[in-house]
Amino acid sequence: MIIIKEDLFLSTKKALYWVAFFIALALCFNAGIYFFMGKELALQFLGGYVIEQSLSIDNLFLFIMVFSSFGIKLEHQRRILNYGIFGAIVLRLIFVLLGVTVVNAFHWVLYVFGVILIISGIKMAIKNEEEADMKDSKMIKLLSKIIPVTKEVHGDKFFVRIDKVLYATPLFAVIFIIEFTDILFAIDSIPAIFSITTNPFIVYTSNMFAILGLRNLYFVLSAMQEKFKYVKYGVALILTFTGVKLTILMFGIEIPVELSLLIIFVTLAGSVFASMAFTRDIPLGNGVVNNESNIDAE
C-alpha cells in the first residue's frame, strides 16, 4: 500500500515532535548540570551531546540502507531499532569505561585517537555514495559461518527451525549488522567526545541522551534523506576537527570548549542549511518508510 503525502507529512511531523522532545529533555538535563555541577561540565555535556547527535546521523543513513537491502517492514524496523538502542546503551558504557581507563593510564592514546578521527573524517567525505547490497556484506558472510541465514522473513521471529536445523532470520541478521556497526561507530564517536572531556559521567550521559532520540530521528531521516544529502560532509568536518583538536594536544595547543562547541554547531547547522537550500525541490518521502501506511514514531 502506497502512503499518501498528507499521511507521510503528518507522521514525519509526529516524529519531529518526539525528536524535539528528546532534545528538550537533554537540554533540561544540561541545565541541571549547569546549576549543580558548574558551567564547565555543562559546556562539556553540550559539546559531547552535539558531537554524538551529529555523528549519529551518518549511522542512521546506514540503518536506512540496511533495512532497504533486506526489505524489512516498518513494524519490524521499530522492534529492531529498540533492540539496537538497548544494545548501544550497554556497548557505550563498556566503551566509555574502557576508553577513560586507557586514556588515564596512557595519555598518548588521545593522539592516536586524533589520527584515527582525521582518517575517518577524510574517508567519510570521499566515500562512494552508491548504495551497497548489505545482503552480500562481510558481516553477513561472517554470521553465515556461525549460523545459516534464511532468505525470507518469518514473521517477527529471529530464529526458526527448518528440517531440524536452526536458522537465523533476516531480522536477526539486521540486528547483527546494526550492533556490529555500532561498535565501529563508537570507535569514532567516543574518541570524538574525548576531544571535549574524559569525564566518564559527562561522556556517558551525553551519549545516552543522544541515543534516546535516535529511533524517532531515524523515521525523520528515512522520510527526508534526500533533503539531508550534504550533512555527511558536515559530519566529516566535525570528525576531522575533533581529530585535529586531539592531535595538536601533543604540541601543548588546546582549543577551548566554548570555541570547539561553536565550530561544531556552526559546521553541523551549515551542512543542514546547505542541504535544505540545494534540495528544496525534492519531494518528501524518498526513504524506505514510503512503503508503509503509517509511521507511528512512538
Image (cartoon, rainbow, N blue to C red):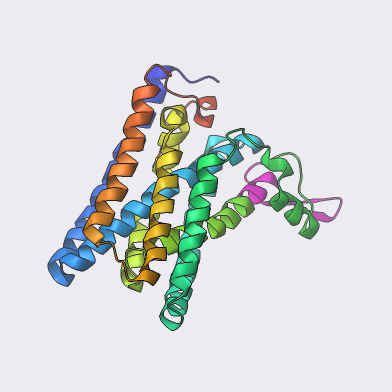
Instruction: Residue at 48% x, 21% y: name it.
Output: 3
Residue 129 vertical position relative to residue 201 in the rendered view, above or below:
above
The stretch in magenta equals 155-174
For the residue pair 277 and 145, the one nearer the viewer reads as: 277
Res 176 → quadrant: bottom right
Residue 105 vertical position relative to residue 169 in the rendered view, above or below:
below
Residue 234 vertical position relative to residue 253 in the rendered view, above or below:
above
Work out which residue is located at the far left of the displayed protein and give it: 35
Q: Position of residue 203 (x, y in %)?
A: 35, 66
**Count of labels shown?**
0
Res 271 → quadrant: top left
Q: Position of residue 67 (x, y in %)?
A: 59, 39
For the residue pair 39 and 295, the one nearer the viewer reads as: 39
Q: Is residue 65 magenta?
A: no
- Left/right of residue 159 with respect to residue 97 in the rendered view: right
- Left/right of residue 205 with respect to residue 42 in the rendered view: right
Instruction: Residue at 65% x, 41% y: name it.
Output: 155
Q: Position of residue 177 (x, y in %)?
A: 62, 51
Residue 295 vertical position relative to residue 218 in the rendered view, above or below:
above
Q: Position of residue 228 (x, y in %)?
A: 42, 32
Instruction: Residue at 65% x, 36% y: name it.
Output: 69
- Left/right of residue 18 with respect to residue 118 in the rendered view: left
Please identify the quadrant where the C terminus is shown.
top left
Q: Is residue 164 magenta?
A: yes
